[in-house]
């Protein structure tokens, strides 16, 4: 892809995502600031981009309020995973993309809370847009898409892969075989890529067969 076009798409996606960031009040201003900092720290926006392009593959369209909410949701989930991955209990990273990590800037407690907030905001964002829908087919599709996000981000997806990764690193007696290594790759990284493309296809009304093919491709 042309670098100029790619940057234009990233800029468009950033605008979409940032429009869904929660607004704080005097009592929770610091956590909303920390969450926004984490999201705005940069990135390729690969997951929402894949979701949007998959949706476009089946519909010919790339603008849809429900799609936009899910694009923000997948990026919030991805960002939460990075925020927690950087924590002292895990990778203990002080910098990401040339900027202080969330816990380095706001403290460990707010690093944990910012990740928690982003994960919950992801599902709030999708559900708020889903409540506006009147078309039963689109409602059903959005429920299926949200279920995919939850599963792929959970213990049988990204979290599961991260758990085995952490366990293998912290236990020197554990001998990582090819099977475990593939499990880590498939779940820690691939699961959210699958969720992105599958959700895009489901929201577009793709058939079960096509969604399965998209999952295999991702």
Image (cartoon, rainbow, N blue to C red):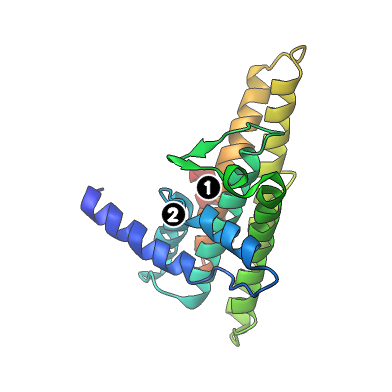
Residue at (66, 48) in percent of width and height = 111
Number of labels in the image equals 2
**Are dots 2 and 1 in contact, CB under 8 Å?**
yes
Residue 109 horizontal side relative to residue 214, left or right: right
- Label 1 belongs to which residue? 193
- Label 2 belongs to which residue? 50
Q: Quadrant of residue 94?
A: top right
Percent of width and height locating residue 210: 51, 57
Percent of width and height locating residue 172: 74, 13
Secondary structure under the numbered disc 1 in the rendered image: helix
Q: Give 107 or 38, whichever is nearer the viewer.
A: 107
Q: Quadrant of residue 91?
A: top right
Q: Give 119 or 135, whichever is nearer the viewer.
A: 119
Q: Quadrant of residue 170?
A: top right
Residue at (50, 45) in percent of width and height = 218
Q: Is residue 100 visible?
A: yes
Crowding near pointer 2: few (<14 within 10 Å), some, many (20+)? many
Percent of width and height locating residue 34: 59, 57
State the residue lying farthest toward the bottom.
Answer: 134
Report, in whole angstroms, how far the alpha carbon at label 2 lies from the one at label 1: 8 Å
């Amino acid at each position: 892809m042309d670098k100029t076009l790619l940057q234009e798409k990233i800029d468009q996606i950033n605008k979409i995502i940032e429009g869904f960031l929660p607004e704080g009040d005097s009592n929770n201003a610091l956590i909303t600031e920390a969450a926004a900092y984490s999201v705005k720290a940069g990135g390729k926006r690969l997951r929402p981009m894949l979701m949007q392009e998959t949706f476009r593959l089946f519909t010919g369209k790339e603008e849809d309020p429900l799609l936009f909410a899910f694009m923000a949701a997948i990026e919030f989930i991805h960002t939460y995973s990075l925020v927690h991955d950087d924590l002292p209990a895990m990778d203990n990273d002080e910098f990401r993309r040339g900027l202080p990590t969330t816990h380095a800037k706001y403290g460990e407690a707010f690093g944990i809370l910012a990740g928690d907030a982003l994960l919950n905001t992801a599902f709030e964002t999708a559900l708020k847009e889903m409540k506006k829908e009147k078309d039963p087919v689109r409602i059903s599709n959005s429920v299926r898409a949200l279920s995919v996000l939850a599963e792929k981000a959970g213990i049988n997806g990204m979290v599961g892969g991260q758990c085995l990764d952490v366990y293998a690193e912290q236990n020197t007696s554990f001998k990582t075989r090819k099977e475990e290594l593939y499990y880590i790759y498939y779940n820690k990284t691939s699961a959210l890529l699958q969720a992105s493309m599958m959700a895009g296809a489901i929201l577009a009304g793709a058939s079960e067969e096509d969604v399965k093919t998209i999952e295999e491709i991702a």
